[in-house]
Image (cartoon, helix red, strand yellow):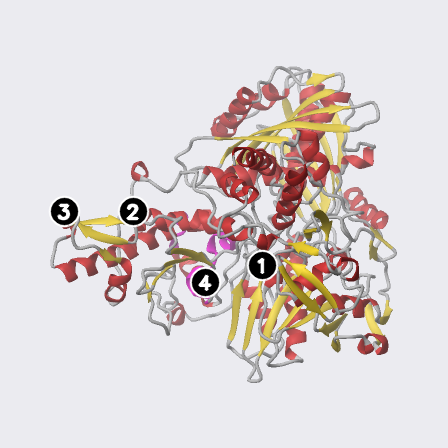
C-alpha cells in the first residue's frame, strides 16, 4: 500500500512497488491528463511535478514517490482560474493534437517556478519534450508570454 | 486514397437514388433535440452542436469547419453554448467524396459522379486524409449553416407573425428590429425541424464574412491544456479492462506456440488470447498488461525471406536497372534532347523508409455486448474502416463508432489493425469494455511505413542554361497496393497508384522533353500513407534537381525556377516572388552559412520555403530560420494555416535530419525515440509563415508544409558547404543537429 498526495488529496493505492507513477495516475487514480508516449522517459508526455521537481512519471516507480506531493496538469488551474502558463497557451493557440501539451505545460510550469525570466537557452535546455505536431514556435512564444503574465501578477 | 474502381459492382440506380447526398433533411432519432441538417443540432436549452465528420488529430479541423457553419448561422464560435464534436452516428452524407474521387465538390457533376457519390454514400465512407476536409466542406458546411438559419428564421416568422425583414439574427437567436421579442434558437428549433428544408439558399458573399478569414482561436485548446480532453487512450468506462498486443518482432512471422504460464500468473492478468499473428494480454491496468506481455514466451516461425534494408534497396536498384516499369508518361523526345544537350546531369536521389510515430500510440476501446452489438471509441481517420474491422469479426449490424480526439494521425490511423486487436479482446469479454494500447515499441515495429525510393534521373540543359529534358525513373513501392491488400476485403482495383508519382509526374516546370516513370516493386514491408504521401519523396527529387540544374548553369535558384514557370503557373510564380521578398533573398550564402529554397504544390496548395542554416566544421547544423509562403486559396483561418505550415515543416525537417527505419534479420531496427529521433525545441528553427491573399477555392493545409522541408534543407546545405546530399536523412552524410 502506498500513500501519495495527488493534487492536494491524500490517496492510498494497493499497487506493486515498481508500477510507474504514470500508470497509477492513469489507470488507478483516473487522472488521464498525463500521457503515455514512450515508456522510457524520452518524450516528456508524462511529465508531472513531484515535491516541486519535474519528473517523467513513466520511469519513476510508485514506491520511490510514496508520501510525496504529486501535481498533474489537472490541478494547475486554481479556483477556476487558469495558471499563467495555461493562459499563455490559450492566448497563443499552442496545441495542435495536444497530446504532448500536458507534459510541456508541466515542464514549463516547473521551469518558471525556478526561473521566472528564462533566457532562450534556459528554455532550450529545460524543455526537451517531443511535440510531433511541431508546435515549437508557439511553445517558445507562449513561454515568453507566461513569463510576462507572471511578472505582471 | 482515391480512384477506387466502381465498375461492375452492379448496384441498382433505384436503390442509389434513395441515398441522401445532401444531408439537409437529416434527422437523428431519439432525444428532445432538433437536427437542422446533418451538421447542426439544437437543444431546447439553446445549446448548438456543430458536427464535424472529420477526426481532430491536430490539424484544427473542428475549429476551421465549425467556422463555416458559424458564419452562416450567425454563431459566436467561442460562446459556451456552441459545441463542436465529431458526430456519433455515421451517415452517407459524411462520405469524403473529395478524397475518394479526387475532385472538388464544386466540380462534381454528370452521371459518373451521381453514381459514385451515392454508391460510396451507401457505404458511409467518412474519412480524414489527403488534406481534404476544408476542400470537401467549404460549400457543404456553409450551406448547412444557411439551411439551418433559413429554417429557424421561418419558424421565428411563424411564431411572431412577422416578415423576414423584421427579424435580426444575433448569436444563437433572433430578435425584432426594435430589440424586442428575443427568441433563442432553442425556442425555435423544434418548430424549425418540422419544416421542409429549402432547396436553394443564398450563401453569404465573401465581402460579408465575419468569421471566415478571421484568426479564430481553436475551440479545443481549453480542454487540451487542462487535461480534460479525452483522446482514445483516455476513454474510461465502468469496470473497463486494459489490454495490450504483442506480435513477433520478425515481420511476417507466424506464431507456432505461446507459453503464457508466467503471464497468466501475474497480478491483474485476466486473459491471454492468440489471434492470428498476435498475442493479446488483458489485465486490470495497462502497465500490468505490458509486464505480462514481456513475460510471454512466443515461439514463432519466421517467413522464408527475412526483410533486410540492403536487400530492399538492392531490389529498388534492380528495378531501375531492369526498367521494369509500372507507369510511364512521356512527352517530346527526352532521349534525343538529352543526347544533344549542351550539358547533361546524371543523378540519383534516395529516401528511406519512415515511421509515423504519432505521439499517442495506437489504441482503441471496445464494448462488445452479449447480443453482438458493439460500441467502439476510436482515434481513427476512418470510422468506416473501424466499423468494417469490427463487423468482419462477427459483430451484428449495430456497430457504433465514437471517433475521439487523436494524438496525431499522419496517415497511420487510416488502418484497421489497432481496431481489430481491441475488438478481438472485447469479443472474448463480452459485456466488459476493453481498452487495448500498444507499447511504443509495438507501435514503431508494427507501423506501416513510408516507402523508400530511389530516383535515377538524367537531365539536359541547353547552352543558355535552360532545362530541355528530364528523364526520371522512380523505384519505390505502391502505397495503394499495400494499403488495399491489408485493409479492404474483396476486389478493389485502383488502376495505377496516382500517389506514386504525385509531384514528379506533374512537376510544374517547363520542360519540353520528359519521361517520368515508376517501377513499383512488390514488398512484404507494410507500406502506408504518411503525411504528404508521394510528395514526401517527390518534392525532394524535383527540387533537388532544380537546384542542381540552377547551380550547373550558374544561375540563381529563384531566377532559374521562375524562368521555367510558364503562364499556367502564375500562382507558383507569385509564391516564389513573395518568398524571395519575404526572405530578403540576396544570394544563397556560402562559407558555412547557407540559404536554400524549395517550391512544391500538393493537396491543392502551393508552398515555398527558404531554410537558413549554419554548418560548423564538425558538420553540426544550426537551423536558424525558415521563411515559408503558402497559397492555399481562400484562407479560412490564418492561425490554423500558420500552425499547419509550421508543423508540417517540422515534420519534414525531422524526417530529413533523422528519419530512417531499417530492417535487419526480418525486424524493424528502430523501436523508440532513442533510435528514431525527433526534432525538439532546442533544434527547431523559427518558422515564419506568410499567406498569399487569394479568392480561389480553399486548398488543403495539413500536408503541403511537409514536402518542401527536405529539399530546402539539402539545398541550403549545398549553399553552405558545396556538398550535395542526395540521400536522406542527412545524418547518413555525417550531418548532425
Work out how far the residue at label 2 is from the one at label 1, CA to CA, in angstroms.
35 Å
Marks 4,1: beta carbons within 8 A:
no
Q: How crowded is mark 3: few (under 14 residues within 10 Å), some or many (20 or more)?
A: few
Closest to the camera, between mark 2 and mark 4, is 4
Residue B393's quadrant in the figure?
A: bottom right
Quadrant holding the C terminus of chain B = top right
Q: What element carries label 1?
A: loop
According to the picture, the residue beneath numbered tag 2 turns out to be B203
* Upstream in sequence: badge 4 or badge 1: 4
Q: Mark 3 or 4, which is nearer the eye?
A: 3
Residue B104 lies in magenta, yes or no? yes
- The residue labelled by disc 3 is B178
- Return the disc, 2 or 4, that comes first in the chain's sequence: 4
Q: In this view, does A13 lie to the left or right of A8?
A: right
Marks 1 and 3, Cα distance to the nearest angstrom?
A: 46 Å
Dot 2 or dot 1: first in sequence order is 2
Q: Which region is colored magenta?
A: B89-110
Can residue B64 be spotted in the picture? yes
Q: Name the residue under label 4.
A: B87
Q: Nearer the viewer, residue B430 or B481?
A: B430
B556 left or right, relative to A145: right
Provide the chain ID for the residue under circle 3. Answer: B
Q: Earlier in the sequence, mark 3 or mark 4?
A: 4
Residue B328 seen in the current view? no
Q: For numbered disc 2, what is the local secondary structure? A: loop
Amino acid at each position: 500500500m502506498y500513500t501519495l498526495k495527488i493534487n492536494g488529496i491524500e490517496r492510498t493505492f494497493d499497487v506493486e512497488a515498481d508500477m510507474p507513477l504514470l500508470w497509477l495516475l492513469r489507470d488507478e487514480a483516473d487522472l488521464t491528463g498525463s500521457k503515455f508516449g514512450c515508456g522510457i522517459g524520452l518524450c516528456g508526455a508524462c511529465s508531472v511535478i513531484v515535491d516541486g521537481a519535474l519528473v517523467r512519471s513513466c520511469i519513476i516507480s510508485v514506491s520511490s514517490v510514496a508520501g510525496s506531493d504529486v501535481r498533474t496538469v489537472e490541478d494547475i488551474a486554481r479556483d477556476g482560474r487558469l495558471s499563467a502558463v495555461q493562459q499563455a497557451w490559450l492566448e497563443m493557440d499552442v496545441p495542435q493534437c495536444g497530446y504532448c501539451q500536458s507534459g510541456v505545460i508541466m515542464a514549463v510550469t516547473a521551469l518558471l517556478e525556478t526561473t521566472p525570466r528564462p533566457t532562450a537557452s534556459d528554455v532550450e535546455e529545460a524543455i526537451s519534450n517531443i511535440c510531433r505536431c511541431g508546435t515549437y514556435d508557439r511553445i517558445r512564444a507562449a513561454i515568453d508570454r507566461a513569463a510576462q503574465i507572471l511578472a505582471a501578477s | 486514397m482515391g480512384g477506387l474502381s466502381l465498375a461492375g459492382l452492379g448496384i441498382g440506380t433505384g436503390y442509389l437514388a434513395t441515398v441522401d447526398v445532401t444531408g439537409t433533411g437529416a434527422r437523428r432519432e431519439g432525444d428532445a433535440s432538433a437536427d437542422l441538417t446533418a451538421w447542426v443540432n439544437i437543444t431546447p436549452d439553446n445549446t448548438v452542436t456543430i458536427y464535424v465528420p472529420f477526426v481532430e488529430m491536430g490539424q484544427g479541423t473542428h475549429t476551421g469547419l465549425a467556422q463555416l457553419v458559424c458564419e452562416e448561422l450567425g454563431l459566436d464560435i467561442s460562446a459556451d453554448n456552441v459545441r463542436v464534436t465529431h458526430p456519433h452516428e455515421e451517415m452517407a452524407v459524411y462520405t469524403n467524396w473529395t478524397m475518394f474521387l479526387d475532385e472538388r465538390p464544386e466540380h462534381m457533376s454528370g452521371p459518373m459522379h451521381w453514381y459514385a457519390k451515392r454508391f460510396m454514400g451507401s457505404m458511409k465512407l467518412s474519412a480524414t486524409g489527403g488534406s481534404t476536409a476544408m476542400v470537401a466542406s467549404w460549400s457543404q458546411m456553409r450551406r448547412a449553416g444557411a439551411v439551418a438559419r433559413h429554417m429557424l428564421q421561418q419558424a421565428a416568422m411563424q411564431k411572431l407573425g412577422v416578415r423576414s425583414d423584421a427579424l435580426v439574427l444575433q448569436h444563437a437567436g433572433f430578435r425584432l428590429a426594435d430589440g424586442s421579442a428575443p427568441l433563442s434558437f432553442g425556442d425555435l428549433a423544434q418548430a424549425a425541424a418540422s419544416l421542409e428544408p429549402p432547396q436553394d439558399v443564398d450563401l453569404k458573399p465573401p465581402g460579408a464574412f465575419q468569421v471566415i478569414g478571421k484568426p479564430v482561436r481553436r475551440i479545443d485548446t481549453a480542454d487540451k491544456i487542462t487535461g480534460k480532453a479525452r483522446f482514445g487512450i483516455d476513454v474510461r468506462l465502468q469496470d473497463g479492462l486494459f489490454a495490450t498486443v504483442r506480435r513477433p518482432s520478425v515481420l511476417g512471422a507466424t506464431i507456432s506456440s505461446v507459453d503464457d504460464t508466467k503471464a497468466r500468473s501475474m497480478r491483474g492478468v485476466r486473459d491471454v488470447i492468440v489471434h492470428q499473428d498476435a498475442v493479446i494480454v488483458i489485465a486490470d491496468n495497462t502497465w500490468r498488461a505490458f509486464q505480462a506481455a514481456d513475460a510471454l514466451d512466443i515461439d514463432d516461425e519466421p517467413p522464408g525471406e527475412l526483410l533486410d534494408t540492403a536487400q530492399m534497396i538492392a531490389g529498388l536498384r534492380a528495378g531501375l536497372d531492369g526498367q521494369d516499369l509500372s507507369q510511364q508518361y512521356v512527352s517530346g523526345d527526352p532521349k534525343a534532347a538529352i543526347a544533344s544537350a549542351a550539358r547533361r546531369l546524371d543523378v540519383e536521389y534516395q529516401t528511406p523508409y519512415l515511421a509515423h510515430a504519432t505521439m499517442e500510440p495506437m489504441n482503441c476501446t471496445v464494448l462488445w455486448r452479449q447480443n453482438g452489438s458493439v460500441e467502439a471509441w476510436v482515434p481513427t481517420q476512418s470510422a468506416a474502416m473501424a466499423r468494417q474491422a469490427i463487423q468482419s469479426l462477427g459483430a451484428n449490424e449495430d456497430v457504433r463508432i465514437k471517433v475521439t480526439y487523436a494524438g496525431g494521425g499522419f496517415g497511420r490511423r487510416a488502418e484497421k489493425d489497432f481496431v481489430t486487436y481491441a475488438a478481438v479482446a472485447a469479443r472474448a469479454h463480452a459485456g466488459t469494455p476493453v481498452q487495448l494500447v500498444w507499447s511504443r515499441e509495438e507501435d514503431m515495429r508494427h507501423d506501416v511505413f513510408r516507402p523508400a525510393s530511389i530516383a535515377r534521373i538524367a537531365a539536359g540543359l541547353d547552352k543558355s542554361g535552360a532545362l530541355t529534358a528530364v528523364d526520371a525513373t522512380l523505384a519505390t513501392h505502391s502505397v495503394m497496393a499495400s494499403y488495399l491488400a491489408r485493409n479492404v476485403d474483396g476486389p478493389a482495383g485502383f488502376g495505377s497508384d496516382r500517389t506514386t508519382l504525385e509531384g514528379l509526374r506533374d512537376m510544374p516546370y517547363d520542360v519540353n522533353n520528359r519521361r517520368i516513370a515508376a517501377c513499383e516493386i512488390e514488398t512484404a514491408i507494410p507500406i502506408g500513407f504518411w503525411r504528404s504521401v508521394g510528395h514526401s519523396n517527390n518534392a525532394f527529387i524535383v527540387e533537388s534537381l532544380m537546384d542542381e540544374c540552377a547551380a550547373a548553369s550558374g544561375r540563381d535558384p529563384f531566377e532559374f525556377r521562375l524562368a521555367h514557370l510558364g503562364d499556367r503557373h502564375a500562382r507558383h510564380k507569385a509564391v516564389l516572388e513573395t518568398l524571395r521578398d519575404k526572405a530578403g533573398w540576396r544570394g544563397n550564402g556560402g562559407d558555412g552559412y547557407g540559404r536554400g529554397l524549395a517550391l512544391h504544390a500538393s493537396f491543392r496548395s502551393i508552398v515555398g520555403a527558404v531554410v537558413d542554416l549554419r554548418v560548423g566544421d564538425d558538420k553540426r547544423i544550426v537551423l536558424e530560420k525558415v521563411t515559408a509562403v503558402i497559397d492555399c486559396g481562400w484562407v479560412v483561418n490564418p492561425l490554423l494555416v500558420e500552425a499547419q505550415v509550421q508543423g508540417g515543416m517540422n515534420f519534414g525537417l525531422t524526417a530529413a535530419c533523422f528519419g530512417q527505419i531499417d530492417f535487419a534479420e526480418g525486424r524493424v531496427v528502430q523501436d523508440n525515440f532513442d533510435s528514431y529521433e525527433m526534432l525538439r525545441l532546442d533544434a527547431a528553427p523559427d518558422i515564419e509563415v506568410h499567406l498569399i491573399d487569394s479568392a480561389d477555392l480553399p486548398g488543403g493545409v495539413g500536408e503541403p508544409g511537409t514536402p518542401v522541408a527536405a529539399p530546402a534543407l539539402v539545398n541550403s546545405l549545398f549553399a553552405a558547404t558545396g556538398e550535395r546530399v542526395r540521400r536522406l536523412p542527412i545524418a547518413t552524410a555525417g550531418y548532425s543537429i
